[in-house]
Image: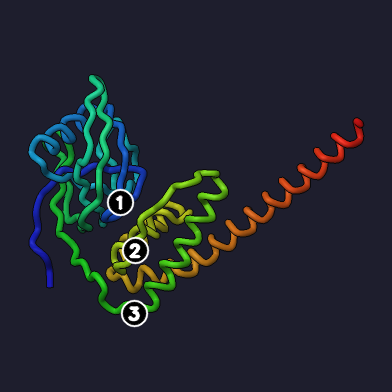
Amino acid sequence: MSMPRTTMPLMPLNAVLFPGMPMPLVLWEARYLQMAEECFDREEPFGVALIRKGREVGGETAETYDVGTTAHVAEYDDGGNHLSLLAIGRRRFRIHSVLDSGPYPRAEVEFLPDDAQAGVSPEFVADIRAMFAEEIELIVQLLGFGGLQLEIPAEADKLSYMIAAHLRLPLVDKQMLLELPTSAERLAREVEIVRREREDYRLLLAAREHVDETEARRAVGRVFSNN
């Protein structure tokens, strides 16, 4: 069953925005400054879609992939000739047509249904959540960000989007994850990637600890050799 269509401002970007995920933006181009200001004043969202062909700034509106995500402005800072804002993704949509006759691009879109927990066992969600939590902890250790904590959701749909946003993947692969129709399919694709990345981070951490230990032994040796 098709969903009702609506029209909203469209911002083509070299980025994939997922529902529930933040996206900081710094805008300089006049048409997108106007778009962001109007959306902020009206408390209305704009759409973010990954560029398939073209550029973010200058020239004609870039060609995008068909599926994107609405962005709601959570923080807004007017820097005079530019805007800094924090947008939060909310709903996926499919673009049916792009309207390029106004001051900035607009698109006729159809919102895509959210499936929440459909077709996903609680045990599988718990398993991949634990794997992802371990991966994040390994990253924190590697970067030395002690005390940094990430609230990882337990709901299948929210978890699938958070994982997709954090995976080390090319943009086209992230777009593929965004376009998958259900959380079950998304998590099924993500589980092996999380497992592989987690192992990579384990190896990196072990290698760093080995190097640190080796350097420490060499330093001790140098100290005692000078006495």
The 10 Å Cα crowd at callout 2, few under 14, some 14 to 19, many 20 or more, is many
Of 82 and 5, the residue lying toward us: 82
Comes first in the chain, label 1 or label 2: 1
Label 2 – label 3 distance at C-alpha: 13 Å
Q: Which residue is mark 1?
A: 21
In the depicted structure, whether residue 2 falls above or below residue 21: below
Q: Which residue is mark 3?
A: 121
The 10 Å Cα crowd at callout 1, few under 14, some 14 to 19, many 20 or more, is some
Q: Is residue 32 left or right of residue 212?
A: left
Comes first in the chain, label 3 or label 1: 1
Amino acid at circle 2: Leu
- Measured as percent of width and height from the top left, residue 187 is found at 38, 69
The residue sitting at 24% across, 70% down in the picture is 116
- Measured as percent of width and height from the top left, residue 152 is found at 36, 59
Helix, strand or loop for disc 3: loop
Of 35 and 196, the residue lying toward us: 196
Q: Are marks 2 and 3 in contact (CB under 8 Å)?
A: no
Amino acid at circle 1: Met
- Measured as percent of width and height from the top left, residue 185 is found at 35, 72
Q: Quarter of the image for the N terminus: give it.
A: bottom left
Label 3 – label 1 distance at C-alpha: 23 Å
The residue sitting at 30% across, 36% down in the picture is 25
- Measured as percent of width and height from the top left, residue 177 is found at 36, 62
Q: Is residue 225 left or right of residue 50?
A: right
The residue sitting at 29% across, 46% down in the picture is 63
Q: Which residue is mark 2?
A: 159
How many circles with numbers are drawn on the protein? 3
The 10 Å Cα crowd at callout 3, few under 14, some 14 to 19, many 20 or more, is few
